[in-house]
């Protein structure tokens, strides 16, 4: 489970929230849009470089083992469409940035509490500022259903993140404590 932020490009004359929701819908419907767009590839590479300049610890994910297993299918997928995925070190904080031709996503697992969560959110904010200032993106937070104002909304996002961490902890606690099981499955009537 992760806290997810969706980045989109504003549309002239369109309300920001409407543009964000339309972009989210387009992303879910068009998982593989076809041939690579050379301009989209340039934008992704430029954003990847800007993000890695902000944090040299980010690296591009390439699953060579999976590509080898898929063989020609992986090569065809690369020719068709491939986002750029950036991750920190394996022992890092779990932030993942995925760059698509016209959108991006930033996710972080519900691992961090209190001061660690503040540090992680500070790092995410740096990435959002780069994506917004250099990529022309705006950020929509589906958890609080709002287009973010980076100057004003960090505490609201941090609060929503903390709530998610609490829910995740509760789920984990119930699983490890062996939540009380009903005497018979709910679907059995006899």
Image (tube, helix red, strand yellow):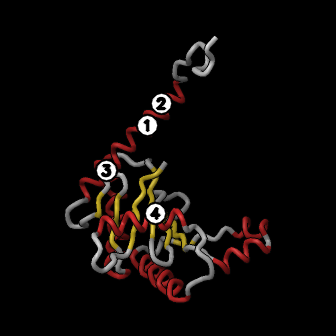
* Location of residue 61 in the rendering, given as x and y in whole percent from the top left corner: 59, 69
Instruction: Tell me how many marks there are.
Output: 4
The quarter holding residue 68 reads bottom right
The quarter holding residue 38 reads bottom right
Q: Earlier in the sequence, mark 4 or mark 1?
A: 4
Q: Earlier in the sequence, mark 2 or mark 4?
A: 4
Q: Label 4 crowding class (10 Å Cα cut-off): few <14, some 14-19, many 20+? A: few
Residue carrying label 2: 173
Label 2 close to label 3 by CB (< 8 Å)? no
Residue most extreme to the top: 190
Classify mark 4: helix, strand or loop: helix
The quarter holding residue 36 reads bottom right
Label 1 close to label 3 by CB (< 8 Å)? no
Label 3 close to label 4 by CB (< 8 Å)? no
Q: Does 186 sit left or right of 94 as displayed?
A: right
**Residue at 39% in and 71% down:** 8
Q: Nearer the viewer, mark 1 or mark 3?
A: 1
Label 4 close to label 1 by CB (< 8 Å)? no
Q: Earlier in the sequence, mark 1 or mark 3?
A: 3
Label 2 close to label 1 by CB (< 8 Å)? yes
Q: Spatial distance from mark 3 to mark 4, Cα to Cα?
A: 34 Å
Residue carrying label 4: 25
Q: Which mark is residue 169?
A: 1
Q: Label 2 crowding class (10 Å Cα cut-off): few <14, some 14-19, many 20+? A: few
Q: Label 1 crowding class (10 Å Cα cut-off): few <14, some 14-19, many 20+? A: some
**Residue at 72% in and 65% down:** 66
Q: Nearer the viewer, mark 3 or mark 4?
A: 4
**Residue at 67% in and 67% down:** 63
Please determine whether, in this image, residue 161 is positioned above or below residue 11: above
* Location of residue 41 in the rendering, given as x and y in whole percent from the top left corner: 54, 84
Residue carrying label 3: 115
């Amino acid at each position: 489970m992760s806290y997810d932020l969706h980045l989109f490009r504003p549309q002239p004359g369109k309300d920001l929230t409407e543009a964000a929701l339309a972009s989210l819908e387009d992303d879910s419907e068009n998982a593989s849009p076809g041939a690579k767009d050379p301009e989209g590839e340039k934008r992704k590479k430029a954003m990847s470089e800007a993000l890695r300049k902000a944090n040299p610890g980010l690296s591009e994910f390439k699953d060579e083992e999976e590509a080898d297993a898929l063989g020609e299918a992986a090569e065809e997928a690369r020719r068709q469409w491939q986002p750029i995925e950036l991750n920190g070190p394996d022992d890092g904080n779990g932030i993942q940035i995925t760059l698509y031709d016209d959108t991006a996503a930033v996710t972080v697992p519900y691992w961090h509490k209190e001061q660690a969560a503040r540090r992680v959110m500070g790092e995410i904010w740096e990435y959002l500022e780069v994506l917004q200032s250099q990529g022309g993106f705006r950020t929509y937070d589906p958890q609080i259903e709002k287009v973010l104002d980076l100057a004003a909304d960090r505490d609201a996002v941090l609060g929503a993140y903390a709530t998610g961490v609490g829910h995740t902890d509760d789920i984990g606690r119930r699983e490890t404590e062996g939540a009380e099981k009903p005497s018979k499955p709910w679907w059995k009537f006899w």
